[in-house]
Amino acid sequence: MARVVILGAGVSGHTAALFLKRRLGRNHEVVMVSPNSNWNWIPSNIWVGVGKMSPDKVVFPLAPIYRRKKIVFRQANAVALRPNGDADSPRGAVDVVYTDPKRAGKTERIRYDYLINATGPRLNFEATPGLGPDAGHTVSVCTPSHAVDAAKHLATVIETLKTGRRQTLVIGVGHGTCTCEGAAFEYAFNVEHELRAAGVRERAEVIYLTNEHELGDFGVGGMTFSQGDHRITSEAWMESLFRERKMKAITQAAVTKIEPGLIHYRQIDGTDNAQPFDFAMLLPPFRGVNLEAFDRDGTDITDSIFAPSGFMRVDANYEAKPFDQWTAQDWPRTYQTPLHHNVFGIGIAFAPPHAISRPYATPDGVLVAPAPPRTGMPSGSMGKAVAMTISDMILHGSPEPTHTASMGEMAAACIASTGTGMLSGTAAAMSMSPIVPDHSRHPDTAGRDPQETTGDIGLAAHWVKRMLHTLFIYKAKAYPLWYLIPE
Amino acid sequence: MDNAQARIDMAPLPGMRELRRRSNLVQQFVRFLSLNWTMYRLAKHHG
């Protein structure tokens, strides 16, 4: 009997667990290690953050699902990898510290035959002084509890606006190397939508503050959409949307410090600026979780397994080279780690070989460089591909990975909400193929397939986003025929 | 140099026809079906 241990029950890890168990059946063991008792459909946190969805609609407890699917669940934090085993056994192991109330603080060493690292990010609020809801002066929508807190602050701002006072709302990213600009964009437009619905829009200034070089970059270098017989850049598309909704924007900015009511930021030309605010939702940069790695004799081998960012090195080309020499082929295909062929890193947990958007820095070296997004659709695809590979290795003895899911080859669809409501909602539906531009395959169309890179705004896209919420939670709950729903 | 705000101020606004299209229930229902098909095809083809 083989044992597959998965670290992290986010989109990629949970997808991998379900597919693995479906293929491996009762003869092999699938163990999920996750510090959280709940699963969270993160894309809908923005609606919790404007008070339009209750937090219980975006989470559900994992334990009953895993009990039903015969997946072993350990509510625990992984703290150390021992890919070559220890003094007792050459079998790989992972050290965990339990987080569930019954066993909180207890430790265990779990042996594995195959390991999937899908730990996702550590929210690195500490990277910017004053950032975040706990020790800082800004709110966040990264977790359901953060989003509930953001909704309370927003309600207070709306009440203040109703008294006739003006308010400034700043929404965006809180560091020069942040990713997930799309989520900040969605939240900004949902806030704007709610201000209009509350009849207080005219007294509010809504500012989108971003590290993107231009609007519509989204950390993927922007897109050029096919719309009927003409083409339009995501930059022009977004500028029009910002003007239509009377939103302001500050781009090319690295937030350096936040004081109560004041955001300090530096732009790529080196200028230092300060933006006053009454309400600020700024996303944090991500780091890998604090996982260490040790050899059999206890030697620290963390640096050979993880990149300096804390993310796991996989089958990517990490050679340092100028931006113009980066290619889609540098991106990982199998997510297998080069040193340990039974260890895989997926979702946000794998170290990207390079940025997708051109990185910039201020004259004094402050990075203004959006990190590549690797959430949602690609995360699910990676989870499924690695699950299929490992099950082929276990069931058929395949010596090499049998499935791939390269961001340099796969397409992604993104539905960015710009306001909720069954009749009044809108969203921007964007698709791109591939996610990482491949200039060798598409030299004349900015590296992407013009037939599969499209954009549209309207009520229909909101319906799709709302439908995906229901569909993906159905899938994550592993209800009948869940596996027919694509990633 | 950040000229995003200047570009926003100069950006074209959608016309009345486009705004009607974005909220017209019949057109949007057709678009809903089309978007679903597009995403399903992308996911099956690339997933």
Image: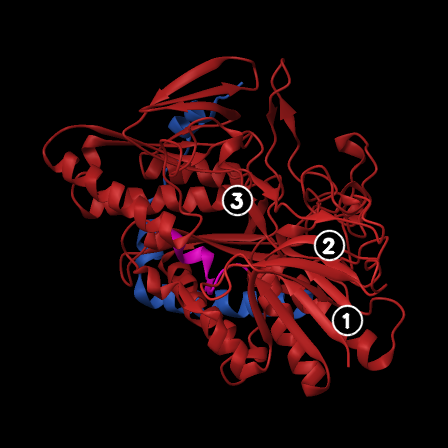
Chain colours: A red, B blue
Rounded to the nearest angstrom, the CA distance separating label 3 from label 1 is: 29 Å
User: In the image, which disc is placed on residue A81?
Assistant: 2
Q: Chain of mark 1?
A: A
Q: Chain of mark 2?
A: A
Residue contact at pointers 1 and 2, CB within 8 angstroms: no
User: In the image, which disc is placed on residue A138?
Assistant: none
The type of residue carrying mark 1 is: Ile
Of the image marks 2 and 3, the number of the one nearer the N terminus: 2
Magenta highlight range: A35-46
Label 1 sits on residue: A390
Which image quarter holds the N terminus of chain A? bottom right
Residue A27 at x, y percent in the picture? 73, 86
The front one of A457 and A275 is: A275
Relative to A436, residue A88 above or below: below
The front one of A182 and A104 is: A104
Label 3 sits on residue: A180
